[in-house]
Amino acid sequence: MINIYKYKKEPYPILFCSHSLVLRHFMVAVLVLVSSLTSLQAQDTDYSKPSWYFGAVAGANFNFFEGSTQKMNAAFTPPVAFHDGDGIGLFAAPLIEYRPANSKWGIMFQAGYDSRKGSFDQVLSDCNCPADLKTDLSYITLEPSVRFAPFKSGFYLYGGPRLAFNVDKSFTYQLHANPAFPNQIEGEAIKGDFSDVEKTILSIQIGAGYDIPLTASGKKTQFVLSPFVAFQPYFGQHPRSVETWNITTVRAGVALKFGTGTRSETLEVIDSESQFSINSPSNYSERRPASEIFPLRNYVFFDEGSSQIPARYELLRKEQVKDFKEDQLKVSNSENLSERSKRQMIVYYNVLNILGDRMQKNPSAKITLVGSSDKGQANGLEMATAIQSYLVNVFEISSERILVEGREKPKNPSEQPGGTRELELLREGDRRVSIESNSPVLLMEFQNGPNAPLKPVVINAPQEAPLESYVVFQNAGATEAFSSWNMELKDENGKIKNFGPYTEDTVSLPTATILGSRSQGDYTAKMIGTTKSGKLSEKEVKTHVTLWTPATFEQGIRYSIIYDFNESKATNIYERYLSDIVTTQIPIGATVLIKGYTDIIGEETYNQELSLARANDTKTIIESSLSKAGRNDVKFVVNGFGENPNDAPFDNKFPEERFYNRTVIIDIIPAK
């Protein structure tokens, strides 16, 4: 019986580096050539898109050997058969491509050097001596392909036959010394050529690539860079007429190609059916809240049947912790209420990261994690331990600072004795881990004890140019009329900027992209469209552009407070917060919008009344605090929206969302 034992082969650093070096030199040559030719063609404008392209391809063949081979030739047969293997070989070829400018179809042809070199997996001979077999198998390959571009982008697919002529069939066999006898002299490598090698191989390939223009459209000579990947299955790729050795190859590389366009004088300039217009708004200073305060419940809810932290919660890797900042969470600023709800959920699903960050910064802070599960105390303890492990392993918080315990019911349950309605939703809300602490640095102002919420998260978002401030170029009908269109913007000093190509009807550009550092300017916008028949269409429109600048007036502030299930009184948790924090932020003559909400548990009519009671409870606390300060200058607008899904700030799919729907949202709008 032959003992075949596979060894882990050495990686290919030298081989891979040599191919990387070839590709690197190829890319440097590409950039130098493109730069020089682009400068020579700088004055050549208004040329059509080429149909013929010529160029070169360079890439790496990732070869995978399967099957077996043993008899090298008539003169040499090693004692043990070789099986699977792999290797990296060079592919280089000239390229010819034909694709009419307005067609999705085209053809490609490349012919060049195609290496299928590699090393078989090491085996053991009968003497327990490791044996290696390498080959420099290579071909001259002819590869015609049909090309198809399904979209208007540079993406394309291609496929076709591969006809290969063998030019190298050499091998190197090396029998090493038995590792058990280190003093044994190793034999010389045996080199030769495989016998029975197929002189011609016919196989197939399929691939995909992406054309990246390197020169602006309208130039006479246009360069394109095309990274690509191709798959060549083992069908037909049997190097020898004997034995079962076959090769599957994945090729990755890049092609540089260039073509010459036709002068626009030969193209008829027509009046197309598209309508070109511009909407350039004056400085758009929309009121946007620059500061938002997000309440943070001290609960983590778990899925039924699982004691693992749910996937909807954002969990970090250890190396990400150093970059986490709670006030820099990626939330975009907007006055849209539903958008604020998305931001609130982003904040809430980072609750464990926020907690870990705060405990890192405050080494004296301690917490108790209380897991509650209707499956019993043991399951609740597992849930709490899962959070403890995350904080210990990722944030490196000492386990001595995190106590855990399990319960069947939370200390403040949603499901009440004798309840019969919507128990499933109530029990989902009770399957949770409560974060309890007496450390003020972790908790909301003025709060302590097991039900105290965590300190709110404050995010100050910078004002960004709103979409409403963008200059909109409307080229109605362009999708149907043109294969693509470009835009030339010329300012009052004759300086020109080019944009495009585009395929859509509408393009929006920030004013800073057009103006740069200027505050305003007058422009002539010239639309140059190429029809699907190769004709040109040009239209000009004049416009004045004003740079968008952030608003300078005082920004509004938005607060949220959370109510317990079926409660309309905020006295226990939020009364002092509303009095000492929120009220002090209300400027003279401001308007305070107070909106109350509920979750979907309970009757709709009852929830409508409950939401309004919550809103009025909040108003009463704020109004009383203002009155004590001798103020009556604030206008209140109070609404209750109940459980109405069209108005609810959050969905009701998860218990987190239902808990946050038991809310009152407070918008403080300064007087104009």
Image: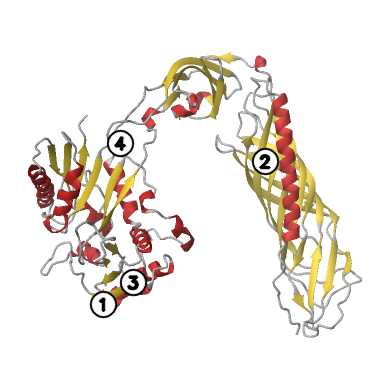
Mark 4 against mark 3, which lies toward the viewer? 3
For label 1, the crowd category at 10 Å Cα-Cα, with few meaning under 14, some 14 to 19 and many 20 or more, is: some
Q: Is residue 112 above or below residue 476?
A: below
Label 4 vs 3, first from the N-terminus: 4
For numbered disc 1, what is the local secondary structure? helix
| Mark positioned earlier in the residue sequence (1 or 4) | 4
Query: Given the image, on which type of amino acid does mark 1 rest?
Result: Gln
Please give the residue where the numbered disc 1 appears in the rendered image.
377
Which residue is found at the position 72% from the left and 66% from the top?
A: 85
Q: Amino acid at mark 3?
A: Arg
Q: CA distance from mark 4 to mark 3?
A: 41 Å
Residue found 23% across the figure and 46% down from its top: 559
Residue 394: x and y, percent? Answer: 43, 65
Q: Secondary structure at mark 3?
A: helix
Q: Position of residue 555 (x, y in %)?
A: 27, 36
Q: CA distance from mark 2 to mark 4?
A: 53 Å
How far across and down, in percent of the image, does residue 522 sit?
46, 16
Separation of residues labelled 1 and 4 (CA atoms):
47 Å
From the image, state whether disc 1 or disc 4 is nearer to you: 4
Q: Is residue 102 above or below residue 263?
A: below
Q: Which residue is mark 4?
A: 288
Q: Secondary structure at mark 4?
A: loop
Nearer the observer, 20 or 112: 20
Which residue, given by chain and number where applicable, does mark 3 sit on?
401
- Give the foreground label among 2 and 4: 4
In the figure, residue 18 lies in which quadrant?
A: bottom right
